[in-house]
Image (cartoon, rainbow, N blue to C red):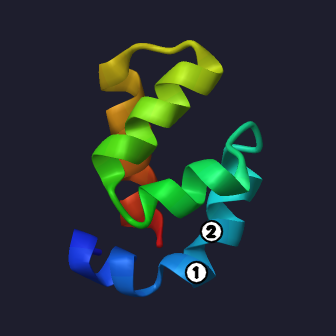
Amino acid sequence: MNEDTIQGKWKQLKGSIQEKWGKLTNDDLDVAEGNSEYLAGKIQERYGIARDEAKDAVKEFERSI
């Protein structure tokens, strides 16, 4: 799924994202608004993982939806 589609379905995807990454707040997701780079940065920050690992996790999530 491309980023434009993700942005269009963002409200529906927020629940799935919070199930997968429960440490993200509603505010984090509201600011992200479909921006995968921002989302990866917040996942990196909240979970203390490497930037590349967070980007890979977001890409994997995008492929799964």
Percent position of residue 33, x then y = 43, 66
Q: CA distance from mark 2 to mark 1?
A: 5 Å
Residue under the point 33% across and 57% down: 35
Mark 2 touching mark 1, by CB under 8 A? yes
Find residue 11 and name its label: 1
Percent position of residue 46, x then y = 63, 25
Query: In the rendered image, is residue 2 in sight?
Result: no
**40 shown above or below 19:** above
Screen quadrant of the N terminus: bottom left
Q: Which residue is mark 2?
A: 14
Residue under the point 39% across and 65% down: 34
- Badge 1: few (under 14), some or many (20 or more) residues near its Cα, within 10 Å? some
- Badge 2: few (under 14), some or many (20 or more) residues near its Cα, within 10 Å? some
Q: Indicate the secondary structure of the residue bearing disc 2.
A: helix
Callout 2, which amino acid? Answer: Lys
Residue under the point 23% across and 79% down: 4
Callout 1, which amino acid? Answer: Lys
Percent position of residue 64, x then y = 46, 65
**21 shown above or below 8:** above
- Quadrant of the rendered structure where residue 37 is? top left
* 41 relative position to 30: left or right: left
Q: Indicate the secondary structure of the residue bearing disc 1.
A: helix
Query: In the rendered image, is residue 54 in sight?
Result: yes
Give whichever of 37, 57 is nearer the camera: 37
Percent position of residue 12, x then y = 60, 83
